Image: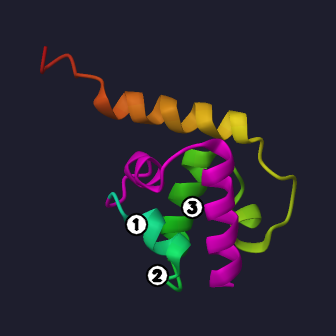
Amino acid sequence: MSNLVSARLGKLCEDAGVSHESVSLSAGLAGGHVGLIVSGRVKRPSADVLAKIAAVLGVSLDWIVLGKGEEPDAGVVRTRVKERASLRRAPTAEAA
């Protein structure tokens, strides 16, 4: 399973032109977590982690884990990740 998950995530990030770090941080994970999954260093990512990544990318958990369903549109993924990243950087009303 892990090799297929890592391959799908790696290809999607590459096609969308988004970094593993930006996906990780947008999902509320440590900056290098997606990169560790893609490289195979994390062999069995938890369902919770994969669900967070799927939510950021706008894909189904079935697609990430099983490859089922329609292949995500790279442009839509790029837009979603950039929007999430900008939300992380936006100052809060309290900080202003």
Name the residue: 75% across, 65% down.
62
Does residue 40 lie above or below 64 as drawn?
A: below
First to last magenta residue range = 1-30
What amino acid is at disc 2?
A: Val
The reply to whether the magenta stretch includes residue 6 is: yes
Q: CA distance from mark 3 to mark 2?
A: 15 Å
Residue 45 image position (x, y, % from top left) = 51, 77
Residue 59 image position (x, y, % from top left) = 70, 51
Residue 33: which disc? 1
Return the disc, 3 or 1, that comes first in the chain's sequence. Answer: 1
Name the residue: 77% across, 47% down.
72
Q: Nearer the viewer, mark 3 or mark 1?
A: 1
Residue 51: which disc? 3
Whether pointer 3 and pointer 1 mark residues with C-beta atoms closer than 8 Å, the reply is: no
Does residue 35 lie above or below 52 as drawn?
A: below
Residue 77 image position (x, y, % from top left) = 65, 40
Whether pointer 1 and pointer 2 mark residues with C-beta atoms closer than 8 Å, the reply is: yes
Task: Specify whether 62 is left or right of 27.
Answer: right
